[in-house]
Amino acid sequence: MQQSEVSRLPSVLLLEAFYGGSHKQLIDLLKENIEDCSVFTLPAKKWHWRARTAALYFSQIVPTCPSYRVLFSSSVLNLCELVALRPDLACLKKVLYFHENQLVYPVRKDQDRDFQYGYNQKIPDHRPKDLDQLIRPKCVVLSYPIQFPDVNSLLPEHKRMRCLRGSAETSQADDIITPQDEQQTVGSEEGFCNGTCESRPVLTPVRGVESADEVEPLHIVWPHRWEHDKNPELFFNTLLKLKERRLNFHVSVLGETFTDVPESFSSARHLLESNILNWGFLSSKDQYLQVLCDADVVVSTSKHEFFGVAMLEAVHCGCFPLCPKALVYPEIFPEAYLYSTPEQLCKRLQQFCRRPSVPRKHVVMVDTSLFSWAFLKPQFQTLLTADAP
């Protein structure tokens, strides 16, 4: 358990029952930027038990403090239980951050689901009249804030040059294939269209002398938790197909590991040994950012995602994103960066392996500043103010 107290009397109580990954990033960000915070956390292990027992634990460990005005927590914590156990916290303004929906969490085996974790996030069946009208004004749709670092000094030359050129020039030179283009150009693997995904004629690129962008193998990065809901099997199976087709590429598999690591990781490490540049969690943030800056394409194969911090961090570092056309991704990424089937993912990577200069020259059409702490800070400051609604 981690506890952080301020020198002055705290007015904001931050509670996190699963202090790791994006949960940790958010709490650390709020602690650093919101004045007069008191922080209590539990380690990021056994989230099932955190969801079940965190309320009981925090009820015993959080001291009584008359200066508290606001309580902030993610929905891992059963807030109703905590307030029932600690009536002195009932009068606080409570901000419950719903980071994901446990009712649709993918299960590994076909068995009866334990719905308790989802019930923690639901309103009871026995509701007062017009409860929805009472709750709706209290609901705020607010993006997860990311503290994007300055990575200019870490970027390779071609990414720095791309930033200098800007999107206006690049938009005319991009040769990005979208799933729609694949349907429109039957039997042609050489047809490419503009990266903005507008309906335009298919362009056939003129091939000249191979540059360094063409010679250096494509670098693919997968920066996600090593758990089954991130669907690593799809990613590794796709890479093995590329390898069977004798396509040249490098891969970096990053992300945190927990108690149960899917077996696919050990077998993939053996089969992809000659392609691996980085394997495993990087404890240094600078090292992690350096790998993202060196990579060309970032891939998500998730079956359960409600934002995707790692994908946006990679885009900030100049990576071309490939995401499922599902979950939260279509809300953030334009059509050019989405795939609908495993075959589409494989085909996109196959094309990039053959022409790595395409993703290297492309300026991603995603404004990451909209998800930055600099942009969202005023809204979070208002949210954590006691007299705000």
Image: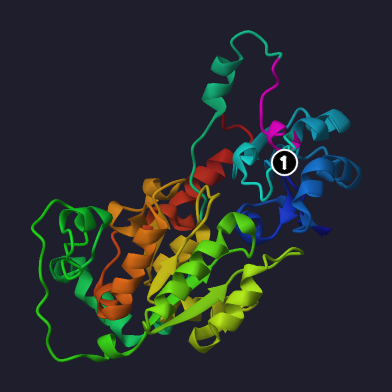
Q: In this view, does 123 lie to the left or right of 308?
A: right
User: Residue 236, percent across and down?
Assistant: 52, 70
Q: Which residue is drawn at 62% across and 54% down?
A: 30
Q: Is residue 3 in the magenta section?
A: no
The answer to which quarter of the image holds residue 111 is: top right
Which quadrant, please, contains the C terminus? top right
- For disc 1, the neighbor class at 10 Å (few under 14, some 14 to 19, many from 20) is few
Q: Main secondary structure of the magenta part?
A: loop
Residue 183 screen position, x and y as percent: 21, 53
Q: In this view, does 97 lie above or below 289?
A: above
Q: Is residue 134 left or right of residue 376?
A: right
- Residue designated by label 1: 111
**Residue 192 drawn at (x, y percent):** 17, 66
User: Which type of secondary structure does the marked residue at label 1 adopt?
Assistant: loop
Q: Which of 122 and 263 is in front in this view?
A: 263
Say whether residue 268 is visible. Answer: yes
Q: Quadrant of the N terminus?
A: bottom right
Q: Give the amino acid type for the residue marked by disc 1 in the picture.
A: Gln
In the image, which residues are magenta?
116-125
Instruction: Determine if the magenta segment contains residue 124.
Output: yes
With 130 as the anchor, is 79 left or right in this view? right
- For this rendering, which residue is in front, 111 or 166? 111
Vertical position of residue 36 compared to residue 82: above or below: below
Residue at the location (50% across, 68% down)?
237
Measured from the top left, where is residue 238 in percent x and y?
45, 68
